[in-house]
Image (spheres, coloured by chain):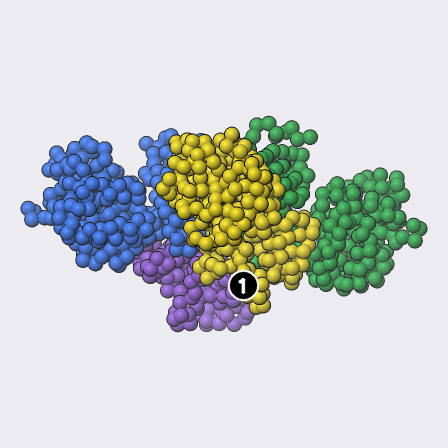
Chain colours: A blue, B purple, C green, D yellow
Amino acid sequence: MADQEAIGFVGLGRMGEPIAWNLLRAGHPLTVWNRTRGKGAALVAAGAREAWDPAETGSAGGIVFTMLSDDRALEQVVGSRGFLERLAPGGIHVSLSTVSPETSRRLAERHAGEGSAYVAAPVFGRPEAAAAGKLWVCLSGEATARGRAVALLRAVSQGLFELGDDPGAANVAKLCGNFLIAAAMEAMSEAFTLGEKNGIDPKTLADLFGQTLFACPIYQNYGKTIAEGRFTPAGFALPLGLKDMSLVLATATSSKTPMPVANLVRDRLLTGIARGREDHDWSALSLGAREEAGLTRRPEPEGTGS
Amino acid sequence: MADQEAIGFVGLGRMGEPIAWNLLRAGHPLTVWNRTRGKGAALVAAGAREAWDPAETGSAGGIVFTMLSDDRALEQVVGSRGFLERLAPGGIHVSLSTVSPETSRRLAERHAGEGSAYVAAPVFGRPEAAAAGKLWVCLSGEATARGRAVALLRAVSQGLFELGDDPGAANVAKLCGNFLIAAAMEAMSEAFTLGEKNGIDPKTLADLFGQTLFACPIYQNYGKTIAEGRFTPAGFALPLGLKDMSLVLATATSSKTPMPVANLVRDRLLTGIARGREDHDWSALSLGAREEAGLTRRPEPEGTGS
Amino acid sequence: MADQEAIGFVGLGRMGEPIAWNLLRAGHPLTVWNRTRGKGAALVAAGAREAWDPAETGSAGGIVFTMLSDDRALEQVVGSRGFLERLAPGGIHVSLSTVSPETSRRLAERHAGEGSAYVAAPVFGRPEAAAAGKLWVCLSGEATARGRAVALLRAVSQGLFELGDDPGAANVAKLCGNFLIAAAMEAMSEAFTLGEKNGIDPKTLADLFGQTLFACPIYQNYGKTIAEGRFTPAGFALPLGLKDMSLVLATATSSKTPMPVANLVRDRLLTGIARGREDHDWSALSLGAREEAGLTRRPEPEGTGS
Amino acid sequence: MADQEAIGFVGLGRMGEPIAWNLLRAGHPLTVWNRTRGKGAALVAAGAREAWDPAETGSAGGIVFTMLSDDRALEQVVGSRGFLERLAPGGIHVSLSTVSPETSRRLAERHAGEGSAYVAAPVFGRPEAAAAGKLWVCLSGEATARGRAVALLRAVSQGLFELGDDPGAANVAKLCGNFLIAAAMEAMSEAFTLGEKNGIDPKTLADLFGQTLFACPIYQNYGKTIAEGRFTPAGFALPLGLKDMSLVLATATSSKTPMPVANLVRDRLLTGIARGREDHDWSALSLGAREEAGLTRRPEPEGTGS
């Protein structure tokens, strides 16, 4: 595996670290950087090199992956001293973060201006899926660069979807996916509340629909979570959900697309934060429908999540 | 199979007829009735008997299934001359129609008052699923009667869900399911519209989500329909969808349950009818989000549906 | 005033009684009936006659006013023994209640079939306005009958609006008015909540808008009520508001008119009832927006309303 | 009047120019600046002085008014060379623009840091009201500076509302006001559409409510505009309405305040732009409800507005 391409990796959070591990295991010499130092210790112990700054993860014609928490963190890395210069000419920045399509379009122009390429490659899947190399990846950006990214991303994913040359397209698809999940959670919550007020245990309905009309993991897993009211610890925290729904609505506004269900789920998340649920999973947006119907929280499950 | 229980069947529409066939094929002597006479001709040719009125399909201690278009049609059959009298004592009325829980509760009382039992047994699945004996059935009502119904319904279903003694419960579950389907269609429509206004073909997103996050038939099939804009001929006509969402909201109002997504999909269906789409499939509710975003209908697919 | 026309009056509730008083004071011989007997005692002491049943308030070619709580109460009076027969031929039923346009249309046909006429004449104004003869009245129905009603209604109103021959039209206008009030309350509540969460006392905003952009009683009075959170005792109880918004939405559904703000205010009222506020004024619908924003109720005003 | 305080004025658009005239007529020596030069010609002919840049309109301890189109234009003026330096120490910037409270808070800090003060003073009223000195002004910011601003603003207003020391408070109040107007327009549109689909001319309802429940100019004027469908020429263009509703929602999001009616009116405005109505008055948001109900635009009024 000595001839595997060297890779830089910036951002070793809950999603970034397992992806970096999979790239290392696939035989790629790996240089990592994380804002909080020390996060890469295990990777370094396994052979990765730790860089002093983001720029050092790159090299002319090389490849750098980033997995950061939001648009601003991504823009800071790209704008950090030497980052763009080191990648040129011919380098590729594979941006895994969930950011706005506008940010991707703007960053793609900046990279092109410096002689490198930006590929948007946001992913679907939780940390466990990342660890198992079972992410779904959406890709968009300049075609040749995209092709190089595809080859590398196979090591971390169970499927890749190419969305063309517009670097923002993959981010739009990713935001659409997160919106669809939130919409499904809201719909389940309304349905389960209607059931509960008519004497049906929400767990019965979650089971029923998870086995029949909606036999897919999103409905099965979130349906169970919602029916049981088990929102801590968070798999994907409520404020992150709010960030994503805000990106959805910003994209909707700039493209003149009314999205009433997106408005609603954004509001449910605002209510969640207004009621002190920052540490809850974003599926706690489902409490909105229950509470409007006069149902109070179930006594047991809170805090018993392990 | 000569010892199979005799069954009455009222309502030979698109759903009722294939269910009746499966009961006949399972060896049950069958007596059928339909408001428009002649619908049962093929069944009669295959050995069923045609009754002169709904009452004649029943007998003391016997079993009658009904599959009717709405609450009113069901109440007319139950109220028709001799219907309740013929079933008593000990007969069972297995009501497959999608009606309001209130109607089921009221009818269950009427049956009990006459010495028979009413079991609500609404089904999920389109006519093809009914023909294949692959329906999902929700059941509720008095326990002994429910047990008898379960045994017979195995012939027409791939799964049965018992929801307890409240005769309305199965109807609540059925309405929740149809609501969840409508909500998923609205959400997909908003997402696909956002994609389309950002240069992504809706079919690409329908594929992507149908293979990944939402790998289940509702998203796959309706996703394709919505992405292609292929709403005729209708599998389940828009006015029927409006009827069901109106039942959802009536149930929500009587049980004091705000359901904002249900309001929205009801309004989308109203818009569909206001724009002359009575003959479209209910998935045409998805046009609302597109049109609000200034997208006009795709030129080709309309009318090319076969 | 001895030659003033004799009048029957059915329904001596909070609105009906002051209207009846004004008709009596205008010199009309008055025959009253109320479901709960004894409510008319003061009127009788002042010269009115109490009837034994609704029918007795009418006479051939005469005029009967009704002011009842809902569609059902109105239909019961009209259907009561002898009511329609006594009015014919040539009598007029002036229906002041807030009911659905469908009910008015149906009742108008029934009256016409018996040789009398039904005029819908719903009113705007609270009991104090009724006592002061300062109601606003909407009228619709057959033109000649409407003309007779107009002459009599001057005694109880500060303004009359004729809406043509369709007997349902006046009810549509009345429902529109109540909807506009509810919508204004919801909008104020959202605005005041936004202010409160940004450090501005709701009373300051209520004052500001009541003096400037919205210098009209609805905004001034309800604005103050909402800003102070003073919802008991009820001027117009929350369940009555729900009844009216349900009529709005039933009319909207039958005429294929999506009304998203009406959906919202209906849901706010449902939440109010789900949270045990049946005895609150319908302006308590404004608590919905506050509570979704994580604001709890102000400690003082509750219960201090006098 | 020779002892009237000298004033700088930046921004001579549709609102700024008439305000500047009133200040000039009140006897204040006036120095004006506008991005597009020449807009101040008439003012200069009447005695005002035209500055070469925004900074030149100010002086140590002096007063500068600004009336600009949006947050960005305001930030550019404040950030322009010398602007803040010229005002210090002791100068006051009276900011009349409709901007976000966040912008006001941030700019107030910047001014304080340089030794001057920022007073937010957004106004209600259209250009004619500005010309007549009949604006309503909301004020907030540091108390002494606010006091000086109040004295000067009497010349341009019929009423002043002080909202305390938080410089963002006046902007919140202004945004609330514009939101209430938009909400009233949406509600009227839904009501008039319900009426129209039940055979009632929208003009009849606009009249009725403008004379009774809502006898205030917002309902009377916008009611007439909406009922007549007369949206051009624009008094306040649709994209400006969208800008304001976006500020409302950004403020709502940052203060965790769900505002469902604000979501709705924002979406109506998005639809308006998606359908090519950028040149329409923002009251054209009312077309959304009509079009969802299947009503097409009235043929005549478009373009006949004069």
Question: Given the current orientation, which residue lies at the most extreme right position?
Answer: C2
Task: Looking at the picture, tell me which residue is in the foreground, C102 or C290.
Answer: C290
| Residue at the image point whose x is 67% and y is 49% from the top | D215
Mark yes or no: residue A200 visible: no
Quadrant of res D302: bottom right
| Residue at the image point whose x is 55% and y is 66% from the top | D303
The percent coordinates of residue A212 (x first, y second) are 38, 52
The percent coordinates of residue A208 (x first, y second) are 40, 48
Helix, strand or loop status at disc 1:
loop
Task: Provide the chain ID for the residue under circle 1.
Answer: D
The percent coordinates of residue D282 (x first, y second) are 52, 55
C83 versus A192 height, above or below: below
C193 versus D289 height, above or below: above
Task: Looking at the picture, tell me which residue is in the foreground, A26 or D285.
Answer: D285
Mark yes or no: residue A243 visible: yes
Tally of marks: 1
Q: Amino acid at mark 1?
A: Gly
Task: Looking at the picture, tell me which residue is in the foreground, D54 or B61.
Answer: D54
Question: Given the current orientation, which residue lies at the most extreme left position?
Answer: A2
Q: Identify the residue position indicated by label 1 in the image.
A: D294
Residue count near mark 1 (Cα–Cα under 10 Å), binned few <14, some 14–19, many ≥20: many
| Residue at the image point whose x is 67% and y is 56% from the top | D207
Q: Quadrant of the C terminus of chain C?
A: top right
| Residue at the image point whose x is 75% and y is 41% from the top | C128
